[in-house]
Image (cartoon, helix red, strand yellow):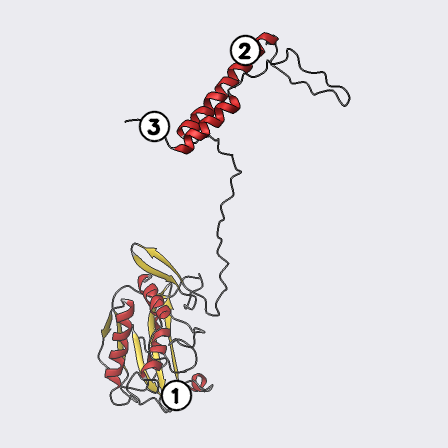
């Protein structure tokens, strides 16, 4: 690369000033430093043991060489206008500890959240409102299809279709398999030995101890060892909505779903938006938690 000479007037003037100021010879260095009188003695500088001290002549030579180097550096700066590069050593700084964000502990909600666990790629939910047996494990049906049937005596028109629709809705969210058996006629009994879930519309006088507290339906199941073997869902005929053959807030469908939930192993929840809330407040379909609980019961079948 070609070198570029700087010939402007400012550079020439600076060089003339430099020569007039530094062109004279520097006075010789004294052979020994002046004696300091008064005040505290100067603090000695420690040198490495065994290193001989330089004589005055050597100090003069070193000082002259240093002065020449300074003059040459200043002359080059004046001629070429460059700035001297300064090498700096970075200052070591104490490492600032990194800030670790710790989430605040979650405030428990009034309704306990089910914890979801993966078991062989299948969602399993520890639902807190399950009917449990003496050993603490949830009560479940066998893994095969569960039979159901309607007691036609006392049932309103359209009850057979409503019952089939209710079981279909449960199967759609849970994975349960149900088998419709032929409806039967006869007086309602507490236990007729049917190995499935029996649905009936009954009068309060048939079960006075059950419907004396204002209940409009009742459901449950019986178990043998650790397996549920028979269940029931009974709707009160005297209730004003017992003849509503639909799943609206005023129909019998949501109440039937509630009682079938008991027959499958669900207990009451304190979630007012859920089917399994103990009072009929207008819920018409299973909540997400209830759907997860039904799936859990199905996957825990015996």
* Residue occupying the far right of the picture: 38
Residue 7's place in the image compared with 148, above or below, is: above
Q: Can residue 85 be seen in this view?
A: no
Residue 68 position within the rendered picture, expressed as x and y whole percent measured from the top left: 49, 17
Quarter-wise, where is residue 286 in the image?
Answer: bottom left
Dot placed on the residue nearer the N-terminal end, 1 or 3: 3
Quarter-wise, where is residue 85 in the image?
Answer: top left
Depth check: 197 or 124 in front?
A: 124
Depth check: 139 or 32 in front?
A: 32
Dot placed on the residue nearer the N-terminal end, 2 or 3: 3
Residue 162 position within the rendered picture, expressed as x and y whole percent measured from the top left: 26, 82
Dot placed on the residue nearer the N-terminal end, 1 or 2: 2
Marks 1 & 3, CB-CB < 8 Å contact: no
Decide if residue 112 is on the left or right side of residue 300: right
Which quarter of the figure is the C terminus placed in? bottom left
Pointer 2: what residue? 61
Q: Residue 206 carries which label?
A: 1
């Amino acid at each position: 690369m070609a070198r570029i000479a700087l010939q402007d007037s400012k550079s020439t003037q600076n060089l003339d000033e430099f020569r007039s100021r530094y062109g004279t010879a520097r006075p010789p260095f004294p052979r020994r430093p002046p004696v300091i009188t008064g005040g505290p003695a100067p603090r000695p500088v420690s040198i490495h043991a065994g290193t001989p001290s330089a004589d005055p002549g050597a100090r003069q030579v070193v000082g002259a060489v240093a002065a020449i180097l300074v003059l040459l550096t200043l002359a080059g700066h004046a001629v070429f206008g460059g700035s001297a590069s300064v090498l700096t050593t970075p200052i070591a700084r104490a490492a600032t500890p990194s800030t670790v964000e710790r989430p605040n502990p979650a405030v428990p909600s009034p309704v306990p959240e089910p914890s979801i666990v993966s078991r062989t790629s299948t969602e399993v939910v520890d639902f807190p409102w399950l009917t449990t047996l003496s050993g603490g494990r949830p009560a479940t049906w066998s893994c095969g299809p569960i039979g159901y049937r309607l007691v036609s005596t006392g049932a309103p028109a359209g009850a057979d279709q409503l019952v089939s629709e209710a079981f279909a809705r449960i199967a759609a969210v849970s994975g349960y398999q149900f088998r419709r058996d032929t409806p039967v006629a006869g007086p309602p009994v507490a236990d007729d030995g049917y190995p499935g879930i029996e649905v009936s519309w009954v009068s309060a006088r048939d079960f006075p101890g059950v419907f004396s507290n204002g209940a409009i339906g009742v459901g449950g199941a019986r178990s043998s060892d650790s397996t549920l073997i028979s269940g029931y869902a009974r709707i009160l005929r005297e209730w004003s909505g017992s003849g509503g053959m639909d799943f609206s807030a005023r129909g019998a469908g949501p109440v039937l779903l509630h009682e079938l939930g008991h027959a499958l192993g669900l207990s009451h929840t304190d979630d007012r938006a859920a089917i399994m809330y103990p009072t009929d407040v207008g819920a018409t379909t299973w909540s997400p938690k209830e759907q997860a609980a039904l799936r859990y019961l199905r996957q825990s079948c015996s």
